[in-house]
Image: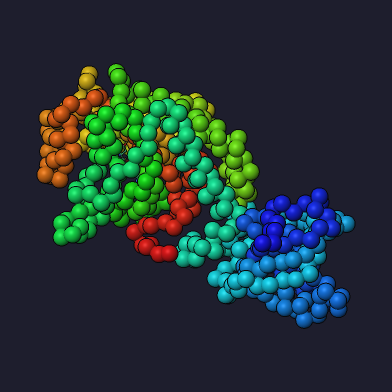
């Protein structure tokens, strides 16, 4: 075969060499006997010039090149040239291609929107408006309806590299702490997080649900002596929450572990894990983060582990302008964000853990505190004042579990095998569930979870 060169590899060292690239037409411009194209491969761009010299390149070929629709995929043969001055606007500024042959591999139809418009920052739009200029922007629904095009913007390319990195670091950090990866069923008989927000379906004539979390199965893995487990898998929630942070399907990063004495052992693992994620992103993905930031400006979040008890969190809120907050109720989005601001001001961190939640606001499987069952051995973790993790020590006593499930109105037959798994001896254990899309959204200070889901599922969207 012929040898292909990647656009991002085009540099001065290849000067005067003949190369072959496959790329998209990013832009085209004709001028007299010349055509100026910008070729794009992923996020790398290079200028390509055709000049009608009546030997290798005809006038017809120049015309043909200017008429290839934007976003079409082309094969281009050319010679690498070093221009007199750098080509502004291209990632490969120091070189250009003198095209000898261009062939369309896949022709693009009319675009629903222009990528330059979809790549524009709000700042740019605002600055233009101040000059009296109106720059087009692309609305979220139009973007999502055409996600396969929208994903080609530099910021989106970077967002999903960061998403991939979070999973990789999660996996590596936990493997190095003695965890093993598991895969639990997503087709299950009953609800795992309470009955309300569950997708019900027919399973060979039997009623079934899509798993709302790996909760019950990851605990059964602990009962089966796997000791430390994690899973990266889809989670389904039939919630009619049309908000900036809820999806009907998201990626759950779950972990579960046997503990010796205290749920703080789980918090130690979580803090180490997120230390690795924050550090890994800031050091190895600085380029991606700056690309995201150039469209959606944000500051890298500060990671200084901090643990606050729920009552301490409530006291901070009460002292910080929210005197009415209910010490035994749950925190709504507004209160969580307020606490995030207060914590940032007082402790200088964007990452903190709130633990010892009131039992009444936690799921049936949560272990009550031994000194005061009004509270529980549970925790949420926040980035920029929004929840990314929820977890707890679990009830490992079958009788107490039956009592708690009954009190919470969970039909016992649905969870019989789960309860049975504790009857044969179960170690004290705890764990946590992380929402991947939320981690990326909040790390990058993005305003909507749909930006960090490749093909988001929400109450109004099932396609593409
Ligand atoms: O708080 P949740 O529902 O907790 C559980 O699923 C427990 N089984 C976890 C455990 O181990 N005890 O979900 C865990 C995390 C949340 O903190 C949030 O980050 C994310 O999953 N999450 C969602 N993300 C997107 N859309 C939704 N509808 C989400 N619901 C929860």
Task: Look at the picture and state if 387 lies above or below 65.
Answer: above
Q: Locate residue 103: give its quadrant.
A: bottom right
* Image spot of residue 330 (x, y percent): 30, 37
Counting every numbered tag in the picture gives: 0
Residue projecting furthest to the bottom: 60
Residue drawn 58% across and 75% down? 110
Task: Look at the picture and state if 63 lies above or below 177.
Answer: below
Picture quarter with ligand 1: top left
In depth, the one of 458 and 161 nearer the eye is 161
Residue 83 visible within the image: yes
* Image spot of residue 439 (x, y percent): 46, 41
Side of 157 where 373 appears, left or right? left
Residue drawn 72% across and 62% down? 20
What quarter of the picture does the C terminus occupy? bottom left
Side of 431 where 14 appears, left or right? right
Task: Look at the picture and state if 292 lies above or below 420.
Answer: below
Residue 143 visible within the image: no
* Image spot of residue 74 (x, y percent): 66, 68
Residue drawn 62% across and 40% down? 286
Side of 151 where 205 appears, left or right? left
In depth, the one of 317 and 279 nearer the eye is 279
Q: How is the image coloured?
A: rainbow
What quarter of the picture does the N terminus occupy? bottom right
């Amino acid at each position: 075969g012929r040898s292909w060169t990647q656009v991002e590899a085009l540099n001065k060292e290849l000067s005067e060499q003949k190369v072959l690239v496959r790329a998209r037409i990013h832009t085209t411009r004709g001028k007299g006997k010349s055509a100026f194209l910008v070729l794009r491969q992923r996020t790398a761009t290079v200028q390509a010039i055709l000049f009608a010299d009546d030997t290798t390149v005809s006038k017809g070929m120049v015309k043909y090149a200017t008429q290839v629709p934007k976003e079409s995929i082309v094969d281009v043969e050319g010679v690498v040239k070093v221009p007199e001055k750098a080509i502004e606007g291209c990632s490969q500024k120091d070189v250009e291609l003198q095209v000898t042959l261009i062939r369309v591999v896949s022709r693009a139809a009319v675009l629903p929107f222009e990528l330059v418009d979809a790549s524009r920052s709000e700042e740019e739009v605002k600055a233009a408006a101040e000059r009296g200029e109106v720059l087009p922007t692309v609305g979220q629904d139009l973007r999502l309806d055409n996600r396969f095009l929208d994903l080609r913007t530099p910021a989106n390319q970077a967002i999903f590299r960061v998403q991939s990195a979070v999973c990789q670091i999660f996996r590596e950090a936990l493997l190095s702490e003695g965890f093993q990866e598991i895969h639990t069923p997503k087709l299950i008989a009953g609800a795992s997080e309470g009955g309300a927000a569950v997708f019900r379906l027919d399973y060979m004539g039997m009623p079934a649900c899509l798993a709302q979390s790996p909760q019950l199965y990851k605990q059964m893995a602990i009962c089966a002596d796997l000791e430390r487990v994690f899973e990266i898998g889809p989670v389904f929630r039939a919630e009619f929450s049309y908000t900036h942070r809820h999806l009907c399907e998201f990626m759950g990063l779950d972990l579960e572990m046997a503990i010796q004495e205290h749920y703080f052992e789980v918090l130690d693992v979580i803090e180490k894990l997120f230390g690795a994620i924050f550090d890994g992103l800031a050091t190895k993905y600085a380029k991606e983060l700056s690309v995201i930031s150039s469209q959606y400006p944000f500051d890298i979040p500060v990671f200084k582990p901090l643990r606050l008890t729920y009552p301490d969190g409530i006291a901070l809120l009460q002292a910080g302008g929210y005197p009415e907050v209910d010490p035994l109720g749950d925190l709504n989005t507004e209160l969580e964000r307020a606490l995030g601001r207060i914590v940032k001001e007082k402790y200088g961190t964007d990452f903190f853990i709130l633990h010892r939640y009131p039992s009444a606001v936690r799921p049936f499987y949560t272990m009550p505190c031994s000194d005061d069952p009004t509270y529980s051995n549970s925790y949420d973790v926040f980035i920029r004042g929004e929840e990314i993790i929820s977890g707890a020590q679990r009830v490992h006593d079958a009788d107490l579990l039956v009592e708690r499930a009954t009190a919470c109105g969970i039909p016992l037959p649905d969870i019989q095998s789960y309860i049975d798994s504790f009857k044969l001896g179960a170690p004290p254990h705890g764990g946590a569930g992380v929402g991947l899309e939320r981690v990326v959204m909040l790390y990058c200070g993005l305003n909507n979870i749909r930006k960090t889901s490749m093909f988001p599922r929400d109450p109004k969207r099932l396609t593409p």
